[in-house]
Amino acid sequence: MARTQIAAAREGTITDEMQRVADRENRDPEYVRQQVADGQAVIPANRNHDALDPMIIGREFATKVNANIGNSEESSDLETELEKLHTAVHYGADTVMDLGTGANLDEIRETHVEHSPVPIGTVPLYEAVKRAGSPEAITTDLLLEVIEKQAQQGVDYMTIHAGILAEHLPLTDGRKTGIVSRGGSIMAKWMEEHGEQNPLFQLYDEICEVFAEHDVTFSLGDSLRPGSLADACDEAQYAELDTLGELTRRAWEHDVQVMVEGPGHVPMHEVAENVERQQEVCDGAPFYVLGPLVTDVAPGYDHITSAIGAAMAAQAGAAMLCYVTPKEHLGLPDEEDVRDGLAAYRIAAHAGDVGNERPGARDWDDAVSEARYEFDWREQFRLALDPDRAREYHDQTLPEDNYKEARFCSMCGVEFCSMRIDQDARDGADGEMAELESSAGTDLESSPAAEVNVPPVGTHESDELPPIEDCEGVPSETDVEPGVESESGTASDD
Ligand code: SF4
């Protein structure tokens, strides 16, 4: 049997995947190997995922962002699902979880793996429920069969809800929002109906053997994560976390890579505590957090409420952030929601990296700032986290080409452009309008720009995305300048 990444690392081997992530992150390959060997980082890379461009998840590396996609009973065609994958990768997802619960699950999953340059994650429990017809009809044989099949299909990591135990269930009785994890509620229902222990916990060693064979990484599900601020950091959440720590060590005994999932809904003053506790209980295994949302009052804006918590978690040591879209708690996200959610989370991840002084992280900020101060609009757009949106907002009021060299924008207007005034003062220029007009190639007489003095706002339609096969791997590789952080870039503006 071929070795897993962690087995190879423990034997002192630097695999091709380790070398690749070292190149991508500008790190020493030996350091990557050591981090994987120690379980402090994972490289989710199923041996059957040929299209994968390997990446690494760990607190000492650039913070990563996951996007969830997947069909439902209402929408299930293959082309739409492939488009969703493409959209997620296009806007900078470092991994994608296929959480489909509709029809054609096998075909869609295989197509995702076949086309995806980023690791694909799944929750096999969903397929098991669909095939069984109800949570209580699931059998251990079915669970193992589904897990084994998905591993053979090339899924890189799987959420396994093995940490919720029968003895944890009474701890949720006083909660305001009960059990909000889908997998958690399914397992709780099964245990209540059968009066037995969690079957995923009982099968855990067999699951480890399947994962070791295909090099699938565990994403240990936090079935008892809080679904509201009122339930954050309660006894149920932390009791399950203790079990997740034990499961982490058991997986390592099987030479299987592990990351651990986390909350959820957590007030700001308890975010760091959550990360620190997980790191301690799970011996530094990478923490993969959903948000957390730091307030419950803003449905429709939960990409923002959660990105605040995600940035704090990233700075405290979370390794990967699972995005939340504006539709959270309200409905199925569309393409614009995916775009907004990913932008919010890539900001959170990058802010965490800057705050943690990750090597090279600030270079990106400095490059954008330099382009901004030089009025190099094209370069500013190119380097922007979402180039298309930056350019579109600029062009709403100043669409003509000559404004791409103008020494102002419509936000302050030409007369009050502080950067232009500052530069003129430093250059000893007198700042005469005629000179400005001539240097910018701008027709101020006929342009509305001089009178517009508000930030441009409004909606937009994104450009049509090229087919996924035209994308050259992870977009960041090709679109961000050398020397500028590249772990989570997005498509070019051209
Ligand atoms: S007009 Fe204001 S926002 Fe625009 S470039 Fe000048 S200082 Fe910046």
Image: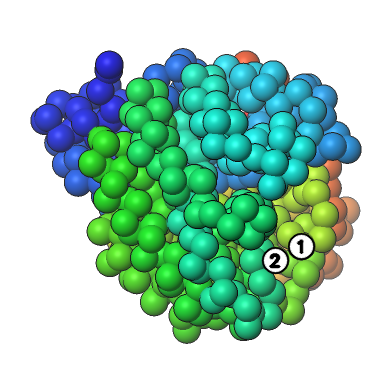
View extreme (left): residue: 12
- Identity of the residue drawn at 75% across and 43% down: 134
- Identity of the residue drawn at 55% across and 26% down: 145
Q: Is mark 1 within 8 Å of ligand 1?
A: no
SS state under label 1: loop
Instruction: Give the left or right position of residue 97, taking residue 454 as reference.
Output: left
User: In the image, which disc is placed on residue 302?
Assistant: 2
Look at label 2 and name its amino acid: Asp
Report crowding for label 2: few under 14, some 14 to 19, many 20 or more residues within 10 A (C-alpha). Answer: many
Look at label 1 and name its amino acid: His
Q: Which one is in front, 318 or 234?
A: 234
Report crowding for label 1: few under 14, some 14 to 19, many 20 or more residues within 10 A (C-alpha). Answer: few
**Whole-percent x, y for residue 461 in the image:** 83, 42
Q: Which one is in front, 103 or 402?
A: 103
User: In the image, which disc is placed on residue 329?
Assistant: 1
Q: How many marks?
A: 2
**Whole-percent x, y for residue 360 in the image:** 32, 50
Quadrant showing the C terminus: top right
Q: Nearer the viewer, mark 1 or mark 2?
A: 1
Instruction: Give the left or right position of residue 225, taking residue 201 as reference.
Output: right
User: In the image, which disc is placed on residue 137?
Assistant: none
86 shown above or below 334:
above
445 shown above or below 6:
below
Q: CA distance from mark 1 to mark 2?
A: 8 Å
Q: Are marks 1 and 2 in contact (CB under 8 Å)?
A: yes
- Identity of the residue drawn at 34% across and 71% down: 277
Identify the mark nearer the N-term, 1 or 2: 2
**Whole-percent x, y for residue 63 in the image:** 41, 52
**Whole-percent x, y for residue 371 in the image:** 50, 51
Colour scheme in the image?
rainbow
